[in-house]
Image (cartoon, helix red, strand yellow):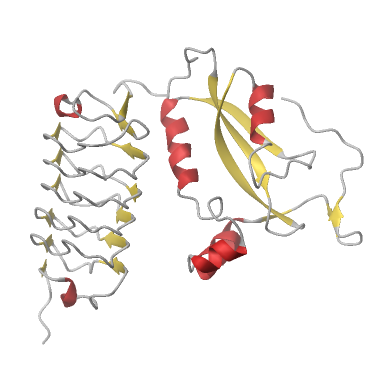
């Protein structure tokens, strides 16, 4: 009978050394010290809900690691010392609500994470956990943490008893808006809805800014699908989502091919595109019958 693996000591126990995307087996309860340290191939890792312990430095210096996925019902309670230190390509990571402690140097030098939310369940963040974060990075917190003071990241605090994301003007009199638009490059008969974070004084100004964004179908009278004021948390969340959106961040067919994204891009578009209600098969174009663009 084959022995069930509960401790992961080496990458070779579950995959070839050149494997780029990994899902940790559900039988694994512990990932031991330095298991993936200095792995230059790994770009994405998914961690199972049965994982109970990460030991120090287990993903340190994975220089091409871009995404880490935790399940929401994770059993993990601590992210250990230097766990993701020097993961300089890391862009996407979600911290599960099971986490109560983020250890020393956990995310040190991870300068590609634009937006990171620290769940309110996290009790402590230890020294230098976010050392060398930059001013263009945002960390959302629900309480004060003393050891965040040496990070240059923008710290946005949401009060624990605050039910909603507070909507307020900035120093220039602008609000933050979420503007949902029809976006193209997916054929005349289809579009993809995308929500953009926009700073503006009025809805009209926000709409005008949104329709100038690349890929937005600015010639359509019904290009704006919705618009609303939002708070800091939602604004920075949208910024991070769009920054990591494969559909928004390719520059054409050549770029897709050069980055070997053909299959991933196609799957993303097929999953998200919607049919144009005003499309005419007869004329192979969208018919708006002289309607003017809706003004908000």
Residue 111, percent from left and from top: 30, 43
Q: Which corner quadrant holds the N terminus?
A: bottom left
The reply to whether residue 263 is visible in this rendering is yes
Residue at the bottom extreme? 1
Asked whether, in this view, residue 137 is left or right of residue 63, the answer is: right
Residue 38, percent from left and from top: 18, 62
At horizontal 30% and vertical 58% (from top left) the residue drawn is 65
At horizontal 18% and vertical 26% (from top left) the residue drawn is 145
For residue 198, which quarter of the picture? top right
Residue 260, percent from left and from top: 48, 69
Depth check: give the residue in front, 216 or 4: 216
Depth check: give the residue in front, 28 or 233: 233
Residue 79, percent from left and from top: 16, 47
Asked whether, in this view, residue 278 is left or right of residue 124, the answer is: right
Q: Is residue 106 above or below residue 42?
A: above
Q: Is residue 112 above or below residue 134?
A: below
Q: Is residue 211 above or below residue 82?
A: above
Q: Is residue 119 above or below residue 166?
A: below
Q: Which corner quadrant holds the C terminus?
A: top right
Count how many numbered circles sit on residues in the image: 0
Asked whether, in this view, residue 295 is left or right of residue 2, the answer is: right
Depth check: give the residue in front, 219 or 181: 219
Asked whether, in this view, residue 266 is left or right of residue 288, the answer is: left
At horizontal 17% and vertical 76% (from top left) the residue drawn is 12
């Amino acid at each position: 009978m084959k022995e069930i693996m509960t401790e992961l000591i080496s990458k070779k126990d579950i995959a070839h050394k050149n494997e780029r995307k990994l899902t940790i087996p559900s039988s694994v309860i512990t990932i031991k010290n330095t298991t993936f340290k200095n792995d230059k191939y790994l770009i994405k890792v998914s961690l199972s809900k049965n994982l109970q312990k990460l030991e120090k430095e287990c993903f340190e210096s994975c220089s091409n690691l871009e995404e880490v996925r935790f399940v929401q019902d994770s059993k993990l309670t601590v992210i250990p010392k230097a766990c993701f230190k020097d993961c300089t390509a890391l862009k996407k990571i979600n911290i599960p609500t099971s986490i109560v402690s983020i250890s020393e140097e956990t995310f040190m030098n991870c300068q590609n994470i634009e937006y990171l939310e620290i769940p309110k369940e996290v009790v402590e963040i230890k020294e230098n956990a976010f050392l060398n974060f930059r001013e263009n990075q945002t960390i959302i917190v629900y309480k004060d943490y003393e050891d965040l003071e040496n990070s240059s990241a923008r710290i946005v605090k949401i009060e624990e008893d605050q039910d909603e994301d507070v909507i307020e003007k900035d120093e220039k009199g602008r609000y933050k808006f979420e503007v949902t638009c029809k976006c193209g490059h997916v054929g005349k008969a289809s579009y993809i809805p995308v929500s953009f974070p926009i700073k503006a004084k009025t809805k009209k100004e926000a709409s005008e800014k949104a329709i100038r964004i690349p890929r937005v179908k600015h010639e359509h009278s019904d290009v704006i699908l919705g618009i609303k004021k939002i708070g800091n948390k939602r604004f920075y969340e949208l910024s991070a989502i769009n920054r990591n959106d494969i559909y928004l961040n390719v520059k054409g067919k050549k770029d897709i091919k050069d980055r070997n994204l053909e299959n991933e891009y196609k799957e993303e578009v097929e999953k998200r595109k919607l049919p144009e209600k005003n499309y005419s098969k007869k004329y192979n174009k969208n018919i708006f019958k002289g309607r003017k663009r809706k003004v908000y």
